[in-house]
Amino acid sequence: MQGGVHEKGSSHSIGGRLLPSILFAATVVGAAAAYLLRIGDGSLAANESYSAWAAAMPGIGSILAIPTRVDPGREIVFYIALHYYSLLFGLEPAAIRALSTIFALISIGLVFALARELFDEQYALGAAALWAFNPIAYIMAQRARTYTLFAAVALAQFLMLWRVRRKATGAAVAGCGLLGGLMLYTHLAGVVIIATELGMLARDFLRGRRNAGPWVAIGIALVLFAPFLPVFLSLSHTLVYGHWLDWIGTPVHYSVAAKAIALALGTGLGLWFLLGPNRESDALEPLRWSAALAILPFAAFYVGSIVLRPLISPRYLTPCFAMLGIAIPAALGRINLRLRNLAVAGLVTALVALVPFETSRSQGWAKVAATVAEAHRDSQPIFFEAGFISPDSIPNNGFPQGYYTVPFNYYFHGPNPRLLVSACDAAAARVKIAREVAAAGGGWLVSWKTPRFAREELPDSGSFRSEILVRGSFLTLYRITPRSSAR
């Protein structure tokens, strides 16, 4: 009899231990199914094609030259990972996007591990589910871009930092430093995350925690990033000038009072996280740290967007969305555990229901290439605009090879001449297009401008016929022919 009772108790104990693992595995499997749904649909976006182009480079040296030679600020760590991955799996859209899916699934595991380290397994399950089906996680898992890798590395770095904060060992400090350096090379937004961690470590110091390990780990990360600083400084004008023009938005002229209020609110929020209240129990510190890493980088970018100019796209801070998935259950749990469970269950259900509707809009590059190929006019030129993508016609030296040549060449391999025109000098572009089209009997313009501005580059309608053949997101293909010739 006693043996039977003991056996039953063991069964419940084993079941109790297995249930969290089963639920976590179900979350990962469900996320994988969602991420892989329609992953190969739609042509690569322009920025994804740069990933494929970089991965096809002959070696790491060529990849490292990309920021200085072609495109400042590009994510070289992801390019290198994709380079070796593509040697096994190729460069088809579904294949290269699947690498982002792999990193996205890894980030779910890291959210679970981090939340369990900060709180407990029940919180970790809720956090993992909230992150797994977050729209940012879903969309980035289907994009051949650095952001899921960025999230995974940032989460791993913070997990190690938290462990070093509790108990510093030489191996843990070195590992945390290496991950911090890797995060900075993965995406420059890692600088804001490192700055937030330094602020929270300063809070530790003011509260009497004198552990030097975390400081050493951050120092290692900064030392590892130091070799890139000369490159970054040499490109700073290009980066700042380019982003001053780019699609994120041109400067918005807020009043001095509005800028002062935004700066004061942002500073106040930062000081609240970093300085007060210093007498609260250590049990609240995990919530404060996770909330700080979820909120303060966003606050810094948004304050900068008001004081300086628009700075942020949400994907730049993908790791912060993951940290938000950890902070929300923890904050709700401080109020009421039943409220936490119901709220997390409701949020996850809503996010899962949205999965079939969350899809990135295809730019249509495959259709553009097919349209040009079907014309069978191999000698006729295809024109691309050189310069930063911008609504303003300000002279600049951005993308001297033409931003859209890379995505076009991914899908089109014909012999047609690829010619460049200035994106900021419509009159010169119009003269060049007219001259070359007249000589060749026709041509195409691939433009990222809206038709209203792109038409300023098109030749005189009295002598040339111009029509739109393909329209996509930030993409228009024009067919241009002399009126005196056959099309």
Image (spheres, grey):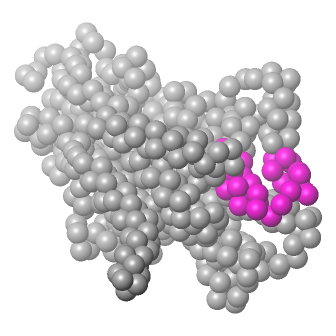
Q: Give the residues in magenta.
A: 270-298
Which residue occupies 20% across, 25% down? Answer: 469
Which quarter of the figure is the C terminus placed in?
Answer: top left
Q: Nearer the viewer, residue 442 or 21?
A: 21
Residue 224 x/y as whole percent: 66, 76
Q: Could you tell me how many numbered marks the image carries?
A: 0
**Could you say where residue 203 lies in the image, as x and y percent from the top left?**
86, 61
Residue 428 vs residue 210, the one in the foreground: 210
Q: Is residue 331 above or below residue 68?
A: above
Q: Quadrant of residue 332?
A: top right
Which residue occupies 23% across, 69% down? 89
Would residue 70 appear left or right of 479 to someone viewing this image?
A: right
Position of residue 256 relative to residue 410, above or below, is above
> Where is residue 458 shown, x and y percent of the image?
33, 22
Q: Name the dominant secondary structure of the magenta segment.
A: helix
Q: Quadrant of residue 215?
A: bottom right
- For the point 23% across and 28% down, the residue is 470
* Quadrant in the rendering for residue 471: top left
Residue 273 visible in the displayed image: yes
